[in-house]
């Protein structure tokens, strides 16, 4: 069993033990017109123990038999898998084991699509965390990431060896949108009678004036403006008018209403009707977008910390953490990240694509290593040379 060398790391925050895992693919062809179903078969190799630790500035690392770091930045490698061929997933499992416990006696089966959903959720969470903390912010990217997390489809994952099934994070805001109250209060009815607009005491502009005819058109589904009659926008507008619950939900509502109303409206599949007009994205709305992103990131991380338990190490008389799965360890390493100081960026070498930890202030670092940087420079040089020769 690999052991951590004494004092090798200062400030080990948690460790996790697991096994290497064999991974093969079963492909079922159901009909010639349909995509085949893909299942991954997983089996733990108990002769190959793996030890992980989290240490500040190193991220989630795997420890070698001699107690040194065998591989650093396990999280960055994990979230680069969705864009890589199956053999990369196999080699990840060989090196690190599966994300949850699996049987050592026989193969256990999981659906390939569900596994990539799960990894995609971690990737989007990390990317959103990076995007909102970059010094130069890409608000279009932030909007797309936050929408894809907030409205991500629910899924469940279970292997026979897992005590409980894994349920992905479900954002409670989505439930609010199911049956929003469209009935106006008496004072609102009076307001509509007295004025041409409602005054909404929202968290973005504090007193926004919404035209009463426009409101009625939206909630009745008769608006002629593209996107305003989508069920999603109708629900958000109804909440915008009537919601009086907690601050987080109010903030999400106010942001979504103004973004979809003024910047760009989306279809129910979240695609834009036309190019969003980012000149309408005011500083108030930018601040709201960052707040909403933080709420969503917080919910994603919190939902995945349930497999982490505090334990007291009697031998060392010190506090420590027990982590139930590699997935928990991955989320725990996101939880400990201080994005004001360091964040994950994807390596711009298309052949690598690994997410690497970089100081937030190092805005120009785009490659995970000098090797990747050199490779891209060489590729560019060769391409230019070829183009010259062709002329
Ligand atoms: Zn790279």
Image (cartoon, rainbow, N blue to C red):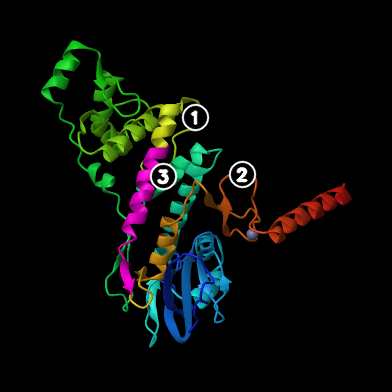
x and y percentages locating residue 60 in the rendered image: 49, 65
Q: CA distance from mark 3 to mark 1?
A: 16 Å
Q: Is residue 308 magenta?
A: yes
Mark 3 touches mark 2? (CB < 8 Å): no
Secondary element under disc 2, as helix, strand or loop, is loop
User: Which residue is the site of mark 2?
Assistant: 363
Query: Which residue corresponds to the image point at 49% horizontal and 64% vertical from the top-left?
Result: 55
Secondary element under disc 1, as helix, strand or loop, is helix
- How many labels sit on residues? 3
264 or 88: nearer the viewer: 88
Q: Which mark is residue 146?
A: 3
User: Which residue is the site of mark 1?
Assistant: 278
Left-right relation of 318 to 36: left
Mark 3 or mark 2: name the one nearer the start of the chain.
3
Left-right relation of 207 to 274: left
Q: CA distance from mark 2 to mark 1?
A: 23 Å
Mark 3 or mark 1: name the one nearer the start of the chain.
3
Span colored in magenta: 290-313
């Amino acid at each position: 069993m690999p052991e951590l060398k004494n004092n090798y790391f200062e400030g080990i925050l948690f460790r996790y033990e697991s096994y290497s895992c064999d991974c093969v693919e079963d492909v079922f062809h159901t009909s010639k017109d349909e995509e085949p179903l893909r299942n991954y078969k997983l089996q733990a190799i108990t002769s190959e123990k793996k030890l992980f630790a989290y240490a500040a500035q190193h991220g989630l690392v795997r420890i070698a038999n001699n107690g040194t770091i065998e591989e650093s930045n396990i999280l960055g490698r994990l979230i680069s898998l969705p864009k890589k061929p199956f053999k990369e997933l196999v080699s990840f499992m060989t090196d690190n084991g599966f994300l949850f416990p699996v049987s050592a006696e026989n193969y256990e089966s999981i659906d390939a699509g569900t596994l990539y959903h799960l990894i995609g959720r971690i990737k989007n969470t990390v990317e959103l965390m990076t995007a909102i903390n970059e010094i130069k912010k890409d608000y279009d990217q932030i909007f797309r990431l936050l929408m894809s997390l907030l409205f991500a489809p629910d899924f469940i994952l279970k292997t026979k060896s897992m005590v409980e099934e894994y349920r992905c994070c479900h954002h409670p805001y989505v439930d609010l949108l199911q049956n929003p109250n469209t009935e106006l209060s008496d004072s609102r009815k009076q307001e509509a009678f007295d004025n041409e607009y409602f005054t909404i005491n929202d968290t973005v502009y504090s007193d926004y004036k919404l035209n009463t005819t426009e409101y009625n058109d939206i909630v009745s589904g008769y608006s002629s403006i593209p996107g305003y009659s989508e069920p999603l926008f109708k629900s958000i507008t109804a909440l915008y008018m009537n919601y009086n619950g907690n601050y987080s939900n109010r903030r999400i509502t106010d942001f979504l209403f103004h973004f979809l109303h003024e910047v760009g409206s989306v279809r129910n599949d979240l695609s834009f009707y036309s190019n969003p007009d980012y000149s309408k994205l005011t500083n108030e709305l930018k601040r709201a977008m960052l707040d909403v992103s933080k709420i969503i990131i917080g919910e994603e991380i919190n939902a995945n910390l349930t497999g982490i338990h505090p334990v007291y190490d009697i031998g060392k008389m010190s506090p420590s953490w027990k982590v139930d799965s590699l997935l928990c360890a991955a989320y725990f390493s996101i939880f400990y990240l201080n994005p004001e100081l360091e964040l994950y960026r994807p390596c711009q070498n298309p052949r690598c694509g690994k997410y690497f930890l970089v100081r937030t202030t190092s805005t120009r670092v785009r490659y995970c290593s000098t090797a990747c940087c050199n490779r891209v420079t060489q590729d560019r040089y060769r391409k230019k040379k070829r183009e010259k020769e062709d002329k």
